[in-house]
Amino acid sequence: MSVKLNTRQVGDVTVIDAAGRITLGEGSSTFRDSIRDLVAKGNKKVVLNLAEVSYIDSSGIGELVSAFTTVANQGGSLKLLNLGKRVQDLLQITKLYTVFEVHEDEAAAVRSF
Amino acid sequence: MLDSTLDSVDTAETAVVEAAKAMGFDEDDQHKLGIAVRECMVNAVVHGNCYNARKKVHLAIVPAPDRLTVTVTDQGNGFEMHQVPDPLAEENILRHSGRGILLIQAFMDEVEVRKAQPSGTEVRLVMYLHRNSG
């Protein structure tokens, strides 16, 4: 299963619930298009909920980084929510844990903007 | 022999994870093997063979009592490891790509990259069974 994305608003914050695999191919292009679409619509406060993401490869990590920079370049910020252990490990290995703001609680993530 | 397509990446990953499962590797190690093989296959298909339909990727899965060895060989032009930018360097940390070899090295017990003959790159991965039991 490639990634499925569901977007919802919590106040002025856009929460993206992602599920499945973010890998090279359909998974990563779906993800990229969705982020670009959100930013084009003026959404600048974005929380990416990865609770249901079971698998990310290096291309998927690249998409997370691109999403982060795409939102930041528009003056916004993207924060991560509910990382599973495997995704946490990937961010540690790649040193991206220091780049992303990571939350374990949605309300706290939304309040943090 | 696998075609130079993204479908082959999935095929290889599935085959290696199945082999690892049959050998008794735990789920975490199966996952790490799967990612490492996936990254090797992506490098072979995308960067090595450049999706060329005339070029193939050779996958060998060799179980042994104490280890699983996987070899991925492409028919591309090869590359030099020292020319791969360090993905952990400050100037590269926000690059979109370039983390595949880092993940392979982080997840596997042994990684060997060498030139294949007459052309291409061969990557040999080894993971030992019971590596966490001391």
Image (tube, coloured by chain):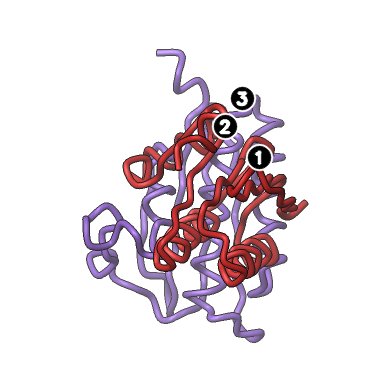
Q: Colour of chain B?
A: purple
Amino acid tagged 2? Gly
Quarter of the view holding residue A55:
top right
Quarter of the view holding residue B55:
bottom right
Residue at point 42%, 42% (across, down): A91
Secondary structure under the numbered disc 3 in the rendered image: loop
Secondary structure under the numbered disc 1 in the rendered image: strand
| Disc 1 to disc 2, C-alpha distance | 8 Å
x, y percentage for residue B22? 71, 31
Q: Residue furthest right?
A: A1
Would residue A38 be found to the left or right of residue B133 on screen?
right
Asked whether disc 1 touches disc 2, contact meaning CB atoms under 8 Å apart, the reply is yes
Residue at point 37%, 51% (across, down): B102
| Disc 1 to disc 3, C-alpha distance | 16 Å
Residue at point 57%, 33% (across, down): A82
Asked whether disc 1 touches disc 3, contact meaning CB atoms under 8 Å apart, the reply is no
Q: Chain of mark 2?
A: A
Amino acid tagged 3? Asp
Answer yes or no: is residue B97 visible: no
Mark 3 or mark 2, whichever is nearer to me: 2
* Residue with the mark numbered 3: B26
Amino acid tagged 1? Ser
| Disc 3 to disc 2, C-alpha distance | 17 Å
Circle 1 Cα neighbour tier, 10 Å, few/some/many (<14 / 14–19 / ≥20):
some
x, y percentage for residue B83? 25, 70
- In front of the other: B84 or A76: A76
Mark 2 or mark 1, which is nearer the start of the sequence? 1
Mark on residue A54?
1
x, y percentage for residue B87? 30, 57
Mark on residue A97?
none
* Residue with the mark numbered 2: A84
Would residue B110 be found to the left or right of residue A53 on screen?
left
